[in-house]
Image: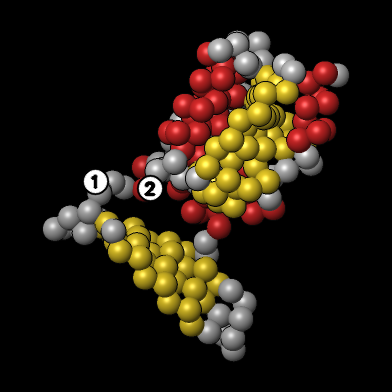
């Protein structure tokens, strides 16, 4: 797995590349946050946390096993 | 991640230091489960030293609270740092788990 972090004016970009099993994040629906614990099914919270905390993300399944996840967070610093 | 146990009367305090992520969450789950299997089902997760909680950590907490409640007990959290509390809030876990400012008040809640 490779991780790169680029801090530019007003933006933090993190790119994570791995060789894990590719999947389509859009198929992962939002979790039911109001469900009782016994009704809660495991899984899906990681993507929920990503969607909740970053300003933009892009997942690109790799054709040769290199999947790339790009996360962009606006930091409010800098000129832009 | 480091885990320490302290048994105090009917309550077990499980202190977790470091990160609870995909690599360490199974150990956290096993630690809680070990106590519950010995009948120690009043569990306090002392997270004063826990600085990171991933979705795998959330899964560990969910499995633990379900197991403890099935056995008639509960998992309650104490001294959660703001950055971890934000993860709990975003995931709806503050509606599931009771969170106390410190271990003493969490322990007191079990005797109420």
How packed mark 2 is, by other alpha carbons closer than 10 Å (few <14, some 14-19, many 20 or more), is few
Residue B6 on image: x %, y %: 66, 29
Q: What residue sits right under mark 1 in the picture?
A: A21
| Residue reaching furthest to the left | A64
Q: Looking at the picture, how far across and down is residue B42, in whole percent?
A: 68, 19
Q: How many marks?
A: 2
Residue drawn at x 55%, y 37% is B3
Q: Are marks 1 and 2 on the same chain?
A: yes
Give the residue displayed 81% in from the left and 33% down from the top. B104
Residue at image mark 2: A26
Q: Nearer the viewer, residue A1 or B2?
A: B2
Residue A35 higher or lower than A7, as above or below: above
Closer to the N terminus: mark 1 or mark 2?
1
At 68% from the left edge and 46% from the top edge, which residue is drawn? B48
Query: The residue marked by circle 1 belongs to what chain?
Result: A
Labels 1, 2: front one:
1
Image location of residue B84, percent across then percent down: 62, 49
- Residue closer to the observer: A30 or A69: A69
State left or right for residue B106 relative to residue A43: right
- The image quadrant of residue B68 is top right
Is residue B55 in view from this perspective?
no
Pointer 2 chain: A
* Residue A14 figure quarter: bottom left
> Looking at the figure, which quarter contains the C terminus of chain B?
top right
- In the image, taking residue B79 as reference, residue A34 lies left or right, namely left
- The 10 Å Cα crowd at callout 1, few under 14, some 14 to 19, many 20 or more, is few
In the image, taking residue A44 as reference, residue B13 lies left or right, namely right
Image: B66 above or below A52: above
């Amino acid at each position: 797995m490779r991780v790169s972090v680029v801090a530019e004016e007003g933006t933090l970009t993190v790119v994570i590349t791995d060789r894990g099993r590719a999947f389509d994040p859009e198929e992962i629906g939002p979790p039911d946050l109001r469900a009782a614990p016994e009704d809660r099914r495991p899984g899906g919270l990681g993507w929920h946390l990503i969607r909740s905390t970053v300003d933009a993300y892009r997942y690109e399944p790799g054709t040769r096993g290199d999947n790339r996840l790009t996360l962009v967070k606006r930091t409010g610093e800098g000129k832009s | 991640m480091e885990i320490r146990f302290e048994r105090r009367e009917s309550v077990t305090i499980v202190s977790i230091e470091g990160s609870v992520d995909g690599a360490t969450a199974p150990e956290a789950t096993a630690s809680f489960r070990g106590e519950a299997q010995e009948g120690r089902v009043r569990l306090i997760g002392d997270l004063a030293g826990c600085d990171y909680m991933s979705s795998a950590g959330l899964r560990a907490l969910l499995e633990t609270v379900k197991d403890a409640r099935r056995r008639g007990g509960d998992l309650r959290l104490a001294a959660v740092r703001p950055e971890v509390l934000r993860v709990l809030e975003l995931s709806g876990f503050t509606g599931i788990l009771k969170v106390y400012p410190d271990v003493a008040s969490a322990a007191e809640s079990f005797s109420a």
